[in-house]
Amino acid sequence: MTALACSARRLPILSAAALAAAALAWAPAASAVQPPLPTADAAEGTGEQDGRASAIFAGGCFWCMESPFDKLDGVISTTSGYTAGRLEDPTYYQVTTGRTGHTEAIKVVYDPQKVSYETLLNVFWRNVDPFQQNRQFVDRGNQYRTGVYYTPEQKAAAEASLKQVQQRFDRKVATELAEAGPFYEAEAYHQDFYKTNPARYNAYAASCGRVEGLNKIWGEEAGGASIIQEHNAKAAAGTPAAE
């Protein structure tokens, strides 16, 4: 990420026009034309359909949250977007002001026969600082708050996982737990950003404090690599997911 883009994330009170100019400075060339408004994904829901299920997590900058889940066997797709806000069809420029109530989030579509929701939760926690309120590392504002947005079927597991984190560290967890609502897909240039713009992504990831922050909290578990490896090894051996 360029210095201009990084400053845009650090200063969410900038006007939408200023943020738009900043975003266009680092967005891929193909996005020089204003990207279309995102579409609401709420109609699909987040429950199981056609053997698939989905889960919504917010972990600060959504660029950094896709990769860990993409590595899990059984995850079908990850999509960056916005959730838990008041405005319908928000754009990135609107959300980044911090005035719409949305948080940057990802929607994980997965095969529950291959990977359990509990495994997704374990990976999620190890990719966030659950004690920071309305921020994640260098990114500040309620649009970077962490959250787990569950279906009725996922609620008990989500609440149990938060309790485990709180008991482990004996600290109040700031991560928001709430029933899943509308999820709006982010603009195309945000999707798979770590793949499509690796140089800019790596520059941002190296300077945003995420790696250092996760290591300080989670130690060897930071990033969930050991959980991912263990899960994938079991999957390769034909062990079914345990719900």
Image (spheres, rainbow, N blue to C red):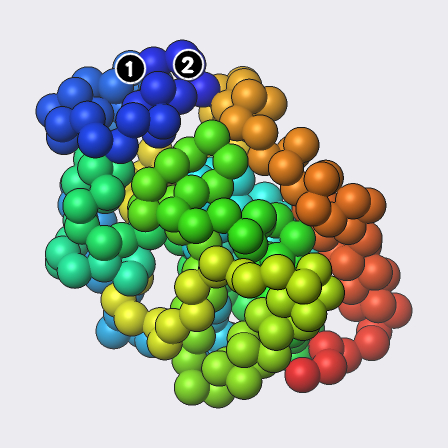
Measuring from the top left, give residue 92's x and y in whole percent: 24, 39
Q: Amino acid under label 1? A: Ala
Q: Which mark is residue 229?
A: none
Q: Quadrant of residue 85?
A: bottom left
Q: How many marks?
A: 2
Residue 212 location (% of width, % of height): 67, 32
Q: Which mark is residue 2?
A: 2
The residue shown at (47%, 30%) is 138
Residue type at mark 2: give it. Answer: Thr
Describe the element under mark 2 as helix, strand or loop.
loop
Q: Earlier in the sequence, mark 1 or mark 2?
A: 2
Contact, mark 1 vs mark 2 (Cβ under 8 Å): yes
The N terminus sits in image quarter:
top left
Query: What label sits on residue 25 in the rendered view?
Result: 1
Residue 95: name its quadrant.
Answer: top left
> Gap in Å between the C-alphas at discs 1 and 2?
8 Å
- Residue 26, given in percent of the width and then of the height, sits at 34, 18
